[in-house]
Image: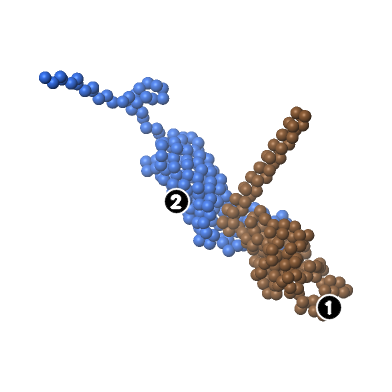
Chain colours: A brown, B blue
């Protein structure tokens, strides 16, 4: 019994130290990022998922990140891992129905939006199956109204940390 | 008949007791710190860190500091991507007050900042609105331990920065150095 309680004490002390070390590491990172941002290291970037490379299936949204120190990493991830089209600054504003502001907290305090576009003109008469060989042109979801964008934002399988409806 | 009063006792100067216990008429003033200091400051007026040279003028309780720091980080792991470069050059004039070893430091100055944005693997640069060369006003209110003559010195304090494009940054720092 005594051995068990000693072990429990040891484990809980270890967990406490790990938690403290984790918090300290996060605090140091947050402070360093604040300093780097003040020095001019932050920038905006976007990843347009509507424009894909190498025949990948496009999506009906564009993601942008405001005030991040990791803009170049975001850009390379967009091109190399998602096959989409990155660029500096925020997503193009023309044709946006509405967007989702991601509630996930990033280490650099950056702000992330997914902006959904009105693609009805592109889909045309072919509807959702306007892609090659009658397949869907855009990967779902393809919201057409503000209410449908709001529904996408509240989908926890898409945004596990939550997201709220936003407008440009 | 009025009784005569006893004469007042002669005034005696108080003896100063030295550390060794033997009374001495006067303790010599402690030597001032050596005039040159090199120090490393974490955070502080140089933002992330800075290496500094301080020239002390003990007669006026003043110190003039010049520093530099360079931070380079390859933000993206992709091959061909470029690094973020952040350099800072703090210049601070400080006034020291208090007892010989334990000083309150009050300083004002400017920090020259330079940043060069990182680029992705295609060479596209991602730079913010304040990339390039800039200047921030800065100051220090803090504690500093000063050695008598040569020796280690250390301190910590509030070191805010103010930049027209970024506003006010409440900031702090801690430093350690050697006076010679």
Q: How many other residues sit within 10 Å of disc 2, few (<14), some (14-19) or many (≥20)?
A: some
Secondary structure at numbered mark 2 = strand
Residue at horizontal 50 percent and vertical 47 percent from the top = B158
Determine the residue located farthest toward the bottom in the rendered image: A125
Residue A2 x/y as whole percent: 75, 28
| Residue A161, image quadrant | bottom right
Q: Please indicate whether residue A4 sits to the left or right of residue B177 in the image.
A: right
Q: How many other residues sit within 10 Å of disc 1, few (<14), some (14-19) or many (≥20)?
A: few
Residue beneath disc 2: B108
| Quadrant of the rendering where the C terminus of chain A is positioned | bottom right
Q: Please indicate whether residue A33 sits to the left or right of residue B34 in the image.
A: right
Q: Nearer the viewer, residue B44 or A123?
A: A123
Residue A128 x/y as whole percent: 82, 74
Whether residue B150 is visible: yes
Determine the residue located farthest toward the right in the rendered image: A133
Residue B111 x/y as whole percent: 50, 54
Against B87, residue B28 (above or below) is above
Residue at horizontal 87 percent and vertical 74 percent from the top = A134
Residue beneath disc 1: A126
Against B144, residue B138 (above or below) is below
Secondary structure at numbered mark 1 = helix
Q: Nearer the viewer, residue B90 or B18?
A: B18
Against B11, residue B99 (above or below) is below
Q: Nearer the viewer, residue B111 or A99?
A: A99
Disc 2 chain ID: B
Same chain under badges 1 and 2? The reply is no
Residue A7 x/y as whole percent: 75, 33
| Residue A160, image quadrant | bottom right
| Quadrant of the rendering where the N terminus of chain A is positioned | top right
């Amino acid at each position: 019994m005594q051995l068990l309680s000693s072990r429990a004490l040891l484990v809980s002390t270890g967990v406490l130290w790990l938690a403290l070390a984790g918090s300290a590491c996060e605090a140091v990172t947050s402070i360093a990022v604040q300093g780097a941002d003040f020095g001019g290291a932050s920038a905006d970037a976007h990843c347009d998922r509507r424009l894909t490379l190498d025949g990948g299936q496009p999506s009906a949204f564009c993601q942008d990140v405001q005030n991040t120190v990791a803009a170049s990493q975001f850009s390379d991830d967009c091109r190399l891992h998602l096959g989409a089209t990155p660029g500096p600054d925020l997503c193009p504003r023309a044709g946006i129905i509405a967007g989702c502001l991601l509630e996930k907290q990033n280490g650099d305090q950056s702000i992330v939006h997914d902006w959904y576009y009105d693609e009805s003109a592109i889909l045309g008469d072919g509807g959702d199956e306007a892609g090659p060989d009658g397949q869907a042109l855009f990967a779902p979801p393809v919201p057409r109204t503000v209410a449908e964008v709001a529904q996408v934002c509240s989908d926890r399988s898409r945004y596990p940390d939550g997201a709220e409806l936003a407008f440009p | 008949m009025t009784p005569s009063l006893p004469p007042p006792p002669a005034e005696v100067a108080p003896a100063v007791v030295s550390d060794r216990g033997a009374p001495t008429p006067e303790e010599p003033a402690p030597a001032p710190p050596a005039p040159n200091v090199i120090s490393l400051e974490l955070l502080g007026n140089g933002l992330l860190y800075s290496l500094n040279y301080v020239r002390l003028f003990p007669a006026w309780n003043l110190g003039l500091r010049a520093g530099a720091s360079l931070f380079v980080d390859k933000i993206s792991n992709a091959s061909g991507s470029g690094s973020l470069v952040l350099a800072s050059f703090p210049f601070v004039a400080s006034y020291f007050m208090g007892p010989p070893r334990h000083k309150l430091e009050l300083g004002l100055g400017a920090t020259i900042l330079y940043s060069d944005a990182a680029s992705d693997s295609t060479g596209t640069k991602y730079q913010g609105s304040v990339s390039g060369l800039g200047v921030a006003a800065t100051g220090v209110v803090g504690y500093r331990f000063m050695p008598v003559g040569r020796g280690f010195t250390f301190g910590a304090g509030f070191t805010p920065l103010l930049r027209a494009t970024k506003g006010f940054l409440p900031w702090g720092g801690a430093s350690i150095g050697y006076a010679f």
